[in-house]
């Protein structure tokens, strides 16, 4: 058994750089860069089988489609657009291409869905006298429910800070952990926070590693084990709030929390992002990031396209007009009736 891997998940930075494309094999030309990019993804991307089943992705057909758009006369802007569109066929928020003038990205995983979150409503619930520790904003709501807003996992979480948060909210009847809009960050931070909600080792999922250039060349699944924190832990009801903008390390956090006792998830399906990212480089120097190692939940189900909540709740226009967050209010009702 293995502990959850200490890997950084981020939407904005490329990690785990691997060897660059051999420039003797692919020339620094529009055609050479196209062929290099297609091959990098063909041999190292990890979700071909899953996405072929989900929506019929055929990487060879993608190559034929975009190869016809490559010409020797095209400039960098044009080439970047074509290559970026080709990567978009993967429908993966962890797939990016970085040039000096732009970043290619796929954000439809969140932009095509309702936000189910409002900054103005967040300010109403937090007020102005909330506390901050390890990037968490927290306070007691007026019905004695603890509320913790976690906008990102980009920074580390100190054990002492989390102890103080737990102590401050200990008198509360239950806890709301709001990760809506959390696009990820450090997987270690997600693990550290989730470790406050279990008293024993828990199997939370599996990970596999690429072992060869074939689309299905993977290692056997390796267990991801969430270990309890050595600090103060929470034993009362917990409601985790989610929306489509929950991605990457935050998606993993939701996966962990669904395995913990006394926890339910409320809101919208998460955005996904279940592939550990790696990066490479094209002959012209543009960096490419892609999902290289697939991760699964405890039932070996892929969470690349998100995790369903236990209770599907949307932010309604009528509640918004009255200054109420439908999803937070639903969570408070659940805790009151626990």
Image: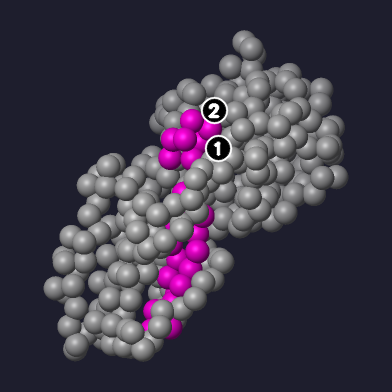
Residue 326 vs residue 91: left or right? right
Q: Is residue 92 above or below residue 27?
A: above
Task: Name the residue nearer the viewer: 169 or 76.
Answer: 76
Residue 127 quadrant: top right
Residue receiving disc 1: 205
- SS majority, magenta: strand
Q: Which residues are magenta?
A: 276-302
x and y, in percent, of residue 290 in the image: 43, 62
Residue 46 quadrant: bottom left
Q: Is residue 335 in the magenta section? A: no
- The disc at residue 293 is none
Residue 128 vs residue 109: left or right? right
Residue receiving disc 2: 265
Residue 131 vs residue 281: left or right? right
* Quadrant showing the N terminus: top right
x and y, in percent, of residue 312 in the image: 44, 25
Task: Name the residue nearer the viewer: 43 or 145.
Answer: 43
Q: Is residue 254 above or below residue 57?
A: above
Q: Is residue 230 above or below residue 218?
A: above
Q: Is residue 332 above or below residue 270?
A: above
Which residue appears at 61% of the width and 33% of the height? 203
Q: Residues within 10 Å of mark 1 (few under 14, many from 20)?
A: many
Q: Residue furthest top?
A: 337
């Amino acid at each position: 058994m293995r502990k959850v891997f200490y890997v950084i998940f981020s939407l904005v930075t490329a990690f785990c750089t691997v060897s660059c494309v051999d420039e003797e094999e692919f020339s620094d030309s529009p055609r050479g860069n196209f062929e290099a990019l297609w091959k990098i993804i063909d041999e190292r991307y990890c979700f071909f089988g899953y996405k072929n089943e989900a929506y019929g992705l055929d990487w060879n057909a993608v190559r034929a489609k975009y190869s016809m758009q490559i010409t020797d006369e095209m400039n960098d802007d044009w080439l970047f657009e074509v290559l970026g569109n080709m990567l978009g066929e993967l429908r993966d928020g962890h797939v990016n291409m970085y040039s000096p003038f732009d970043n290619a990205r796929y954000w439809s995983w969140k932009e095509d869905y309702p936000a189910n979150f409002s900054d103005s409503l967040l300010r109403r619930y937090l007020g102005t006298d909330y506390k901050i520790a390890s990037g968490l904003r927290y306070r007691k709501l007026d019905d004695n429910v603890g509320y913790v807003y976690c906008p990102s996992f980009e920074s580390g979480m100190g054990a002492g800070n989390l102890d103080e948060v737990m102590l401050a909210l200990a008198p509360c009847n239950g806890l709301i952990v709001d990760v809506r809009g959390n696009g990820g960050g450090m997987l270690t931070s997600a693990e550290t926070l989730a470790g406050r909600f279990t008293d024993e080792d828990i199997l939370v999922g599996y990970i596999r590693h690429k072992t060869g250039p074939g689309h299905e060349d993977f290692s056997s699944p390796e267990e991801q084990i969430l270990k309890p924190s050595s600090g103060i832990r929470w034993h009362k009801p917990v409601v985790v709030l989610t929306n489509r903008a929950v991605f990457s390390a935050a998606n993993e956090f939701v996966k962990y929390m669904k395995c913990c006792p006394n926890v339910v998830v409320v809101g919208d399906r998460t955005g996904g992002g279940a592939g550990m990212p790696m990066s490479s480089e094209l002959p012209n120097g543009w960096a490419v990031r892609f999902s290289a190692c697939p991760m699964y939940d405890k039932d070996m189900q892929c969470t690349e396209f998100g995790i369903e909540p236990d209770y599907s709740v949307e932010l309604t226009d009528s509640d918004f007009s009255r200054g109420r967050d439908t999803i937070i209010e639903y969570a408070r009702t659940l805790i009151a009736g626990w």
